[in-house]
Amino acid sequence: MAGADLSASVAVFLIALPLSLGIALATGAPLQSGLVAAAVGGLVAGRFGGSPLQVSGPAAGLTVVTAEIIQLYGWRTTCAITVLAGLAQLGLSALRVARSALAVSPAIVHGMVAGIGATIALAQLHIVLGGTPQSSAVDNVLGLPAQLADIHGAGLAISALTVAVLLCWPRLPGRAGQLVRKVPAALVGVAGATAVATLAGLAVPRVDLPSWSSHALPGMPEGPVLGIAAAVLTITLVTSVQSLLSAAAVDKLVAARPDGGRGVPRSVLDRELAGQGAANMVSGALGGLPVAGVAVRSVANVSAGAVSRASTMLHGLWIVLAALLLVPVIDLIPLPALAALVMVVGIQMVSITHIRTVTRHREVVVYVVTLSGVVLVGILEGVALGIAVAISVSLHRLARTRITREERDGLHLLHVRGQLTFLAVPRLSRALHQLPHGSDVVVELDGSFMDHAAYETLSDWSAGHIAHGGTVEMTGPSGVRITDPTPTAVTASASAAHACCRPWTPWHNHQCGEQPAERTAGPDEAPEATEAAESRRSPGLHLASGIGKFQRNTAPLVRDELARLAREGQRPSQLFLTCADSRLVTSMITSSGPGDLFTVRNVGNLVPLPGEESGDDSVAAAIEYAVEVLRVDSITVCGHSGCGAMQALLSGGPDDPPTPLRRWLRHGRPSLERMASRRHAWARISGRLPADAVEQLCLTNVVQQLEHLRAYEPVARRLAEGTLTLHGMYFHVGEAQAYLLAGADEVHSYDDVFTQVMPTGPREPARAS
């Protein structure tokens, strides 16, 4: 266990102890329930969760929800609801939906958190003033005048002292201030208020922890079924979203460390959701509050230098010891001090930074509606209102397309600003048909999306306009041409027919838009059709035909970029090592262009171990050059289905003649041995076993070649520095589907599971190029 984990656990414990008591007080639950939840969050969620440095426990964001459930159903039923919510989280984890929680608009999340914070602050303000909070935020606001007329001086003085310490402690100046600020402000504020109240003999209500022998445990849920179900759903959603967003924030904090978070694995969100579910089940069963990942404690844990989950678990252990051994000290804490602490936390949940962020992204309406809904109606209702408004705003932006027209020296310019969807088709069609027949037109598209209806409208108009003697040129927002003007209607239709493959991928045997082979091109026919027919009659002309197409269609588009690369030199980000198989088009399956990949291809995508190439150091030289000179960020080994080299390995024997192919394939024998070894589990592909032995060897070979890469001294050094990552990839040719190896960048830790790469956005119709 690292010393940093020990010191970090103490720092987190000192923050968690007063906060847990304050949150229990704010919910109206037994004070011991806050300590139970803090201990379970540290020990259970810390051990089984997927975010090693996230600290879980009773969260301020759950205060309003829990308080309302306690009021409606009582404490014992609330504990049972917490257990059921934990069970629901385990179910969601099994369905692997954790990452979908991150798809919620940040404006909705920030609005929900701010609404909860405002509700907490209003409720705790009544306790600070010596009164009792009402059941809703509106009632608390309406009751403030009467509360201000009946202030309890001693309690207000203790609360004011606590607030002053909380606000001033982080701002202490100088070197001495830097040293003392290492003690958490929450601990100093509550400890200072306790000392003043005790020494001055102030008559204020204090913490009263009952005996653990009388601690209330859950009972059978009592109440309407729909009400219980709604409570379970509310706790499940709030705890899950808060925990997952907090885990994502912890990853960012760890990555921002000076060492880049070396040695700390990133959060596994589905496992984190399962850990939170287990913690909620245990906490509810032991009579504790609901548990969630807590940002304040997690930030303190990361800032204190924690390096493993040991710090989180130790903080839970310290909570247990304090609850058993420090009860006389805890009983001295004034309740107004805890109320002031929670009130400040609630106010801080209304973050100015978040307001600036949503303002910058023009989502203030979503934020305000969500906040208002949470405060005035409830959390689930407020979030639902926020989602409805967010969808409305997105649809408004999607439908808001500006189309303007101008004429310059006989050239008609049509500017299209925004996304081109079916909602904009009527205005687009009207603007296009107002352009004079036979005119020269430039259409400038300034948007990132064009749906099928808009594409068909633009394509059909373009073909008709060219047929009437006009010219059409499509440009991007900066004036860069994205389609060549075509002189004839035949050329325009051929361009549209080939839109799915020109100009980037005119590969051999591609049949998109080709005409029947046995015919001759007419006088007005597109050159591509003539070349295609000629190349079919004389296969030897195919290469020259392809070069001609490149010079005519593609070269004008890439000439500027290639000129820049010629001047500046290559700066690829990745070494891509794959098989020489002709069916693997690396630029196509990686969506890469000139200068992106430093590619090495050989039979079987093999990486010989250092010193074993027997006079042919080509692969080793490429690795050294890519890692040491080009300083690539990553290396990918890509295998593929139906690999002939792997089939030859399987069918080969010791008596085979030592041909050049057989001598080269000996570098693949470790893959055969790995597949036959019982020490290694068979690789799986997207949750299933391989279809046959060849596919199994293809997958195993990728894993084995990654291990060979680690034997190269430059690769090992860069991996140790954290400046290089390794990736395994498998391309299924027949399915046109890529799979990535899970865990390939972890040192000597391969899951041997290839996961499917799914599309990350809606499929757009191809644009004419």
Image (cartoon, rainbow, N blue to C red):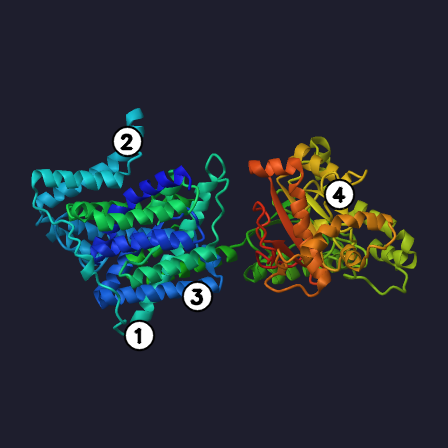
For disc 2, the marked residue is: 180
* Amino acid of disc 3: Gly
Q: Position of residue 747 (x, y in %)?
A: 57, 45
Q: Tell me which residue sits at (62%, 56%) in the image.
A: 680
Q: Nearer the viewer, mark 1 or mark 3?
A: 3
* Amino acid of disc 2: Val
Q: State yes or no: discs 4 and 1 in contact (Cβ < 8 Å).
A: no
Residue 290 visible in the shown view: yes
Secondary structure at badge 4 equals helix
Q: CA distance from mark 4 to mark 1?
A: 68 Å
Q: Name the disc covering residue 556, or none.
A: 4
Q: Name the disc covering residue 225, or none.
A: 1
Tell me which label, 1 or 2, sits earlier in the chain.
2
Q: Nearer the viewer, residue 603 or 462?
A: 603
Q: Tell me which residue sits at (42%, 42%) in the image.
A: 1
For disc 3, the marked residue is: 91
Q: Nearer the viewer, mark 2 or mark 4?
A: 2
Q: CA distance from mark 2 to mark 3?
A: 45 Å
Q: Position of residue 115 (x, y in %)?
A: 30, 53
Secondary structure at badge 1 equals helix
Residue 115 visible in the shown view: no
* 269, above or below 357, in the image: below
Secondary structure at badge 2 equals helix
Task: Report whether 11 appears left or right of 159.
Answer: right
Q: CA distance from mark 1 to mark 2?
A: 52 Å
Q: Residues within 10 Å of mark 1 (few under 14, many from 20)?
A: few
Q: CA distance from mark 1 to mark 3?
A: 20 Å
Task: Report whether 516 appears left or right of 134.
Answer: right
Q: Position of residue 204 (x, y in %)?
A: 10, 47
Task: Report whether 525 appears left or right of 228.
Answer: right
* Amino acid of disc 1: Val
Task: Report whether 412 appears left or right of 55.
Answer: right
